[in-house]
Image: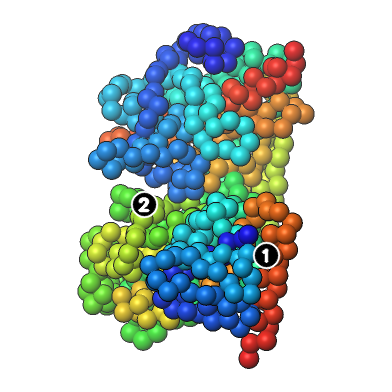
Amino acid sequence: MTTRYPAITADVRKLFVERGAAMVEVAVLQPADPFLDMAGEDLRRRIFLTESETGAALCLRPEFTIPVCRDHIASQAGTPRRYGYLGEVFRQRREGGNEFFQAGIEDLGDPDIAAADARSVVDAHALVAMALPHLRLTVTLGDQGIFEAVLAALGLPRGWRMRLARAFGSRAMLEAALADLANPSRNGRLGGEAALLAADGDVEGLAAHIEANMDKAGLSPSVGRAPADIARRLIEKVQLRSVRLSDEAFAALKAFLAIDVPLAGAGAALSAFAASTGLSFDAALENFSARTVAIASHGLNMDAVRYDAAFGRPLDYYTGLVFEIAAQGEAGVLVGGGRYDRLLTLLGAKATIPGVGFSVWLDRIETLREGAQ
Amino acid sequence: MIVLALPSKGRLKEQALEILAKAGLTVNLPEDTRKYHARIAEFPEVEIAFLSASEIAGEIGRGGVDLGVTGEDLVRENLADWEERAEIVARLGFGHADVVVAVPDAWLDVDTMADLDDVAADFRSRHGRRLRIATKYWRLTQQFFSGKHGIQVYRIVESLGATEGAPAAGSADIIVDITSTGSTLRANHLKKLTDGLVLPSQACLVASRKARAANDAALLDEVVARVGAALLSRP
């Protein structure tokens, strides 16, 4: 180990192993496609890209979760399994260096979602508390699952639910989506035969019409969007054209997103919200409460844990818990974590493997430690 | 001494020389057309360099030239944080073309970016891969899709020519490309999205924000002022 490693490296490794996460090594040079596929093209300008002699796009690892999950799939290791890591990641940043250390645990395949979620929050908290004993820590928790359950309980059409769920975690995107749904745009250009077929809800007739158009344009009906996909979505769109988001639904969503309470009172706040709006999302609420109980059972100081209903990450593989840990009075998040039950399937796993994990910004922790000395 | 870079060939070169002539800046073209340097008769301290339009954008960003005539699309695409390194001092009124998002005509259900957001979100689960966008404008595409419209999940397929043919060739699903009349799009059975205008572009006089001596800065201001006056007096 070189001296470049953070001073707390040995302590972090020891903590991880004590908590049942075996340390793994991850290659620095990674195929770039999985990162761009999962996180989107926006990542392209923030990673260090290079090319192999054969033209394959490679990058310096910008994070650990995706490589750890890919290595897990490739090794065909059994689950449940917890992987610990500590090493450098490489990103183009305006502030701070381009290479910095992260550590974390990826917890794969545990069917007890509440227990695994709680363990992730508690392990992350233990690491930061060990490194920064002099600071008060705050944990902020959000839940994609609760938001999606509220959307379903509101009885919103599928297309709308998907749109809002995608925007979860981004205030600007969510507001834009709500404004659109309150005031849907007209499909102005549709005319002739297609308009009639769409109004009749004739999927087959419309698909045949579209296939003829694709044929004329030289588009293969099997390479990208299929005629039936386009027909179905067009019919759905025509049907939704006359529907708009009701004032009650709009008000309920706003009230939900404004919930920001200590976690200990979050179950009660959600129940009160459900009662006052007449919405029912009991199953999601039960999962939420089971997790809260599990977190409390670890002896974590619950005063420092908040639930913010609007907190989420607009990435499509996050499915439930998301959380952050920060030091009170200090800018900058020290830990980011969350549940990503869709990620391993997206990366090519044959069976569904649930996963939850966190990553600690060791460079920020080092800075706070130096400040304290 | 300052350097003014002009497009080395084509309509863009002719129109740039016309504007300079109207501004009272006579470019003494070299007799040997293989030479890529010239002078301005009225200002011997202004050297002209003939470069390709995309090289001009790059040289302005690098500080290799002081002023240049090039497309706004190239400045915004080729320079990261372009506003820190360059300034558009005049839009010249020629070389008009729009960078647009276009999808196959057959996508009857897609008229807007919001529609495309829907389609992109479902794409992976339906087709086992992300929506692919062919373009030579990866920076503009990413700013428009990710930054302006919050669409995260798509892949850019870099295309260096005949972008409009990518959907039919099966190498991409949609395109982001530059078009002046839209006829190439129509011929390839593509349609522009109603809110799919990424950038209305035209030829611009662009100044590098590099540091320069006071007399060079004054000279640059003089050239810019003359071009500005010529644009105002244009019928």
Q: Is A317 situated above or below A28?
A: below
Q: Earlier in the sequence, mark 2 or mark 1?
A: 2
| Secondary element at image label 1 | helix
Residue sitting nearer the eye, A183 or A373:
A373
Image quadrant assignment for residue A204: bottom left
Q: Residue furthest right?
A: A329
Question: Can you say whether A350 is above or below A110 in the image?
Answer: below
Q: Residue at x 47, y 33 (%)?
A: A62
Tell me where residue A69 sits by quadrant. Answer: top left
- Report the residue at 36% width, 37% height from top: A58
Q: Amino acid at mark 2?
A: Arg
Task: Determine the residue positioned at 71% across, 25% down.
Answer: A327
A327 with respect to B47 (left or right):
right
Chain to which the residue tagged by mark 2 belongs: B
Q: Residue at x 45, y 28 (%)?
A: A64
Residue designated by label 1 = B220
Is residue A241 something that shows in the picture?
no
Residue A40: horizontal and vertical position, in percent? Answer: 45, 47
Question: Circle 1 marks a residue in which chain?
Answer: B
The single residue placed furthest to the bottom in the displayed view is B235
Within 10 Å of disc 2 (Cα), the crowding (few <14, some 14-19, many 20+) is many
In this figure, which residue is indicated by the disc labeled 2? Answer: B130
Relative image position of residue A216 (x, y in whole percent): 23, 77
> Does residue A219 appear to the left or right of B60 in the view shown?
left
| Image marks 2 and 1: residues in contact by CB distance under 8 Å | no
The Cα atoms of the two marked residues, 2 and 1, are separated by 48 Å
> Which amino acid, mark 1?
Leu
Nearer to us in this view, A243 or A24 = A24
Residue A355 tag number:
none
What is the quadrant of the C terminus of chain A in the image? Answer: top right
Q: Position of residue B168 (x, y in %)?
A: 26, 67
